[in-house]
Image (cartoon, grey):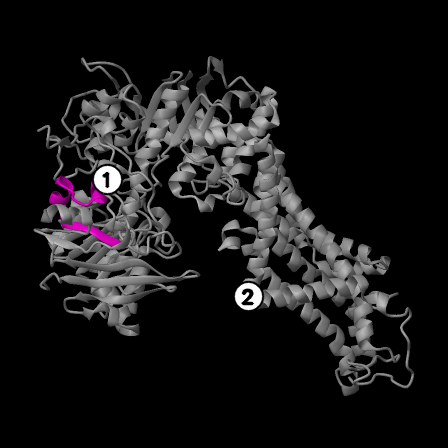
Amino acid sequence: MSKQAPGVRIDGLTVVYKTTAGELPAVRDVSLTLEPGSITGIVGESGSGKSTLALSLLNAVQPPGRISAGSVEIDGLGDVVGLRGEQLRKARGKHIGYVFQAAQNSLNPLKTVGKQLLDLGRSHGVEDLRGLVREARELLGRMGLDGARVLDSHQHELSGGMRQRVGIMLALVLNAHVVVLDEPTTALDMITQANILKIVREVHAERGLTTLVITHDIGVVAEVADRLAVMYGGRLVEQGPTREVLGSPRHPYTKGLIRAIPRLVGDIDEAQALPGRPPTLATVPKQGCVFRERCALRMDVCDDVDPEAVLQGTRTVACHAVTVKEHA
Amino acid sequence: MSVLLESSSTSAAMRRNFWAGVWRVMRRKPSRLVGAVLMAGFVFMGAFGPLFYPNPLPRDVDQLTRPPSWEHWLGTDDQGRDVVALVVTGSRYVLLAALVTAVITVVLGTGIGLFSGFKRGRWDTVLMRITDMKLTIPGLPLLLVLSTVWKFSSAVQMGLVLGLLSWGGVARAVRAQTLSLRERGFIEAARGLGLSTSHIVGRELLPSMAPYIAMNMLIAITGGVYSQVGLFFLGVLPYESNNWGQMLNTAVFRSGALTVPSALGFLLGPLLAILLLTLAIVLVVDAMDEIFNPRLREE
Amino acid sequence: MITGTGVVKTFKQRGKVLGARDVQALRGVDFAIPKGGAASFIGESGCGKTTLGRIIAGLETYDEGEVAIDGVAMSGLKPKERQPHFRKIQMIHQDPYSALNPTRTIHQTLHAPLSLRARQTGRSRSWIEERAAEVLSLVGLDPGSVLARYPHQLSGGMRQRVVIARALTVDPEMLVADEAVSMIDVSLRLGILALLKDLRERLGVSVLFITHDVATARYIGDDGELYVIYRGQVVERGSVDTVIADPVHPYTQSLLSAIPVLHGLEQPGEQPVVPLESLDESRSDEGCLFARRCPFRADRCESERPLLQITGGVPQEHACFHPERRSVIARPLSEV
């Protein structure tokens, strides 16, 4: 805990997938900085490239995908994109903890949690396995579980919320200080979700982490994240401090997304679905703005020119219409 | 009316699409085409092969048990007959029996498995106990016993017996598939809509299992070939027409192919045929998943 | 009109000789969903809401109590006789991916129930094709471009529309939507909710919405009724707006408190209720079912079970000895 939270700088990252139609970008020219000690939330629908981006942080994009350009610099580790083999394996877990999508189901059903913990420790050459178990018990206890009992349990003996906590424990137990949570609360109930989010917030603060939360649910980000980044069609279309982005979204997609959230109060007709549907890898426009098909502010220039991400105060927005307005 | 016409033309178009899709899938890997060509070759051999040769085959008493030569590609047997001719004429019995075995295995196995998995409850228990009992009967000893009373002179009889002995595994597997499929949303929806059981089983369940059933069918063919060749090779069955198993038997036990090099071709002939048939089937099975899945067929 | 009185469902655990524990999925539930009306079942997973929905759709049996469709009691009928009644109630599944047969085109998927319906009502074959196009248009799809496609060629939102169209082929009186939008892209969810609301208004189909997300339940219609279900018991029941704005049961309050607050747009409620976390799996069936997790429990709650009723000057039915209004939901900043 003496170690300071590391910063992460993603610069010009492009990840392509090889398909019959050639190499298509799932993530295109994304630059994003995770400030040391912050929680950043990435919001996007299916096919937005958010999970691919998260995997790039571990340099774990599986073929047919590959990182074709850009870098991911992590303090104290260097450029992850350049790491190979053993170095990379050591970095995962020790520097970067990853809680996988559907972590509820990512445990080995045949082994107790404790056995899996020891496997993890051995594969990372941990000498003090006793210490590792102690650390795991503490972490679980911190998250409101009976550590000893959980370590003795098999996956099927744990509820969804408990499994998610075990996932977080396994990501943190090797003392990683960069943590990626991919859809941490999907398939969980509201109350369990609220609990998990509270734990994420608390553990983040206590252990001095730099956290990245990937989700399709703006509500999750709103609850935990300091900064919010919105992805669409492989592009990062808007990012900034969570409250500001939610309070006054600028990119038309962010606006639409927020307006599409069902709320508990207010006129129900105020909430509106976005027209059209999110693009897939094959249908993302190769040229011009990725969002133009569903955009109300579409202009001629959107067809040909991909909008640059422009810094506006604390916010970065990639939209021609917004940029034009700012300059006018 | 125009709508009606449109729909009948869509179904014709879909059929066209299916075969275009099959072609696409086969073309994806050259090995699949090789398999398909080999298989077509075997079908042709079984159906028309014997017509190219006189019956009985001519014997050349000067050429007893000869090694391969230009005249006899795989040599001759101990009666001076050409081994290639023997393999070709012997294929009909083997392939027909294997086909009958496979059809019975798959039809019985699928039928029982589907019924058992779909009905569940008492029917399931009874049918599965029967299946278990059947599975515990060791096939080969039973066949040996059977062969003492029954001569298996026709390929259909042979296939029938083998088929009746081998549906158990398929039934169990199909039942398991049915049990998991029937929990899927679309089966439940079909029940909720009030669609008939025959529709649900025939139009919803079966097509979803088609790749699986086709695969089992192909594998059952190899199984059928192995068991009957094995039986004839062991020499427990009298034979009236030549077939691959009987050739192996004669090659090993009469011509001593394991020690006499000149009889090697005699041994190699049927072995090569079995090897190629297995290869053809393995290569084609690889394509089944993609053929019956509309998504994989298309991409 | 579909009504239920005292519906009980127990799942028997088989296979275990010792320590076999039956799971009480429903402990005597009453409900009434009027023709053209709307109702929502709210609760955590495992609370019994899905089981109840499946019972209503005829996909599951019940052990005690009675379900009646348009006044006809179902328990007295043979399975074959029930079918025409349950036809009126169609289920929309959560997962639009498994709800459509991947090997059948949309045309084939719609054709089967339509030809059955044509036989029942003595209509011609051309009606089938017309109706197929009609139901697709009703759910906002273009028949020309969708009919010949396979499910995998459609997006999640379009599939869910096809699922709804398929349900409409048999002229249902009620749609049971079980978490029908939870697997759909966020930007498209509202479209599906609006469609269900629209079908209600245009066709007079009643909608039963089952979800753990209270906010979506509002979108089926503000005249709808909300049933909050906890461990097989309805703990609060009333009109959507009343229950959301003035919940009195601590469980409802904790459900509402758990909804993420959009900081920057909203202000959290002043009295959020966080349920005590009960990690003890051996749940006691004594007293109030929620007592173990209730931050406000009293002695009486441990020994006696409250029944669903109207007391204490509260407009909605509730099953709590100490109903109390608490301000739990987030309010828009613009209103504060």
Residue A191 is marked as none
Q: Nearer the viewer, residue B165 or C88?
A: C88
Q: Chain of mark 1?
A: A
**Residue C165 percent location from the top left of the image:** 46, 31
Mark in front: 1 vs 2: 1
Return the residue at label 1: A256
The answer to whether one can see residue B185 in this image is no
Q: Quadrant of the N terminus of chain C?
A: top left
**Residue C190 percent location from the top left of the image:** 30, 34
Could you tell me which residue is drawn at 60 percent across and 40 percent down? B9
Category of crowding for the residue at label 2, using alpha-carbon neighbours closer than 10 angstroms: few (below 14), some (14–19), many (at least 20)? few
Q: Find out whether the residues at labels 1 and 2 contact each other: C-beta distance under 8 Å.
A: no
Return the residue at label 2: B29
Q: Quadrant of the C terminus of chain C?
A: top left
**Residue B241 percent location from the top left of the image:** 86, 66
Instruction: Give the spatial CA distance, label 1 vs label 2.
Output: 45 Å
Question: Quick one: SS at disc 2?
Answer: loop
The answer to whether one can see residue C174 in this image is yes
Q: Is B203 on the left-hand or right-hand side of A197?
A: right
